[in-house]
Image (cartoon, rainbow, N blue to C red):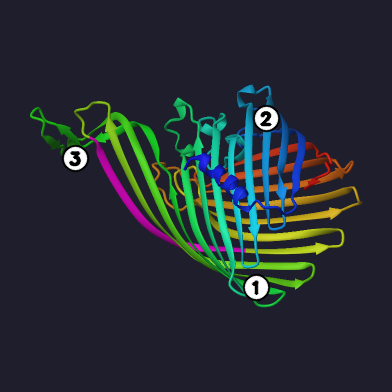
Amino acid sequence: MKIKTDFLLPAALVLFTGNSYALELLFEPDFSFKERYDDNLRMQIKPKRTNLISTLSPGVLFGYLADDNELKTRFKWNELIYHGDSALDFSEKLVNVNHMFRSELFKTDLTAGYSEESSINNQLDPAQINELGGIQILVPRTTKSVAPSITYNLNETNALQLGYNYVDVAYDRQASLASNRYYSDYSNQQFSATLTHVYSERLSFNLTGAYSEFDSPSEQRGLGLVQRVLAPNGASVTLRPEFQFGAPGNTHFSQIQRTLFYQLGLQYALCEQTQLSLTAGIRNINSDFNSRTTFDDPSFLPTESSQSSSTSGNVYSASLIRNFERGNLSLSASQQLNPASTGTQQQTTLFSASARYNLTDRWNTGINASYQMSESVTNFNGNNASNNRTYTTLTPNIQWRWTPEINLDLSYSYRQQQYESTNQTAIGNSVQLQFSYQPQINRQVK
């Protein structure tokens, strides 16, 4: 999918929805500066150094608000500077477009994005992060996404939402990383339908069904097993097993996973301050894996192999949000299927909690904690090492609203990652100070 298509669609929506109604034009620039100290940036088992990272982040949001639709476009630039480790310096670019149109009977939403990011910031897929893993160097990651949806009000209590979500992820690997299976490009698309029934002001139910396709092709350089050769007369000869041997060549891997899942959920307001959400369902995955090896010697004929499997599992989510006079508390648990760069999808089980308390009108403090378990749903990607791991974080913070335009945020983060394949644990600590500035700009109304 071309990125041009992703961003022409919002422009087209603007033309079709444009009218003589009053428009409130949006223009909101912002700037932030972060200084972070990290004693295990790469989450290694035995870290070799500490890092001081400066991040300059200018950005701007512009668009409009109308009576029946709105458009918001955000541009963000993150200039990452690693002091004493300049090989990791990177300029991240992020663009997000959101358009929403509403009428009495239906509502449409469109979200599209394009980003160029450093994999060191967002890559947690490898099973073992050590000096030999590609995570130790900078591997740029490009992400393209588009997600349109339409919600139709069947009547006063029932609504039907149809949605589509497409994500394409590519890694700019160096030649030395051509065989690194932890950076496998992938695409994932999902079609979904959700029926919502409002039972009362406090209780609603929903039923969701979805179908997705995950595609992750990759290529690996190495020795392949020669099974067939060309005879002098040009005929194909199949070697007996005891005469088969390894020869240099390239192996192309292709894995497609087709997932069907459906779930039932509810949202219930226990009181004005407390909201409970529950969903539960099942998912089924059909995986097809193919490999084809071509050899440097043209007299060795290509070899092919294929495998398939079918697995099932559960998906669920639960959240409880409680608002207090001077703060809030949030608890959540979920088990979902997520695309990953290891050549296969991962089942992620996550438990998280967050709390925030307003000390004064300008001071507030909070804490976030999470425990995440990730495991691959298949092992066809040619990597014998297990990708299963657990990842724990604990982040207390305090924020000062210096002025209506300026905020200061100080936080500490503890991270622990344990790898099932080696039963080893990596621990990291970081301290971050962030300065953010968003000028107050009067919006224009036409």
The residue furthest left is: 233
Name the N-terminal-most of marks 2 and 1.
2
Note whether 434 is above or below 311 in the view shown.
above
Residue with the mark numbered 1: 204
Give the residue drawn at x 44%, y 50%: 214
Camera-side residue: 199 or 141? 199
Q: Which residue bears the numbered disc 2? A: 80
Q: Which one is earlier in the sequence, the residue at label 2 or at label 3? A: 2
Q: Measure the C-alpha gap from mark 2 to mark 3.
A: 54 Å
Callout 3 environment at 10 Å: few (<14), some (14 to 19), or many (20+)?
Answer: few
Q: Which tag is nearer the camera, tag 1 or tag 3?
A: 1
In magenta, the rendered stretch is 302-317
The residue positioned farthest toward the right in the image shown: 360
Residue 307 inside the magenta-drawn segment = yes
**Is any atom of residue 423 visible in this view?**
no
CA distance for labels 2 and 1:
45 Å
Q: Are marks 2 and 1 in contact (CB under 8 Å)?
A: no
Q: Position of residue 229 (x, y in %)?
A: 17, 32
Q: Amino acid at mark 1?
A: Ser
Q: Which residue is under mark 3?
A: 241
Residue 420 is situated, as x and y percent measured from the top left of the image, at 52, 47
Quick check: can you spot residue 185? yes
Packing grade of label 2 (10 A; few <14, some 14-19, many >=20) is some
In the picture, measured across the screen, residue 14 lies left or right of residue 275, that is left
Question: Which of labels 2 and 3 is toward the front?
Answer: 2
For label 3, the SS is helix
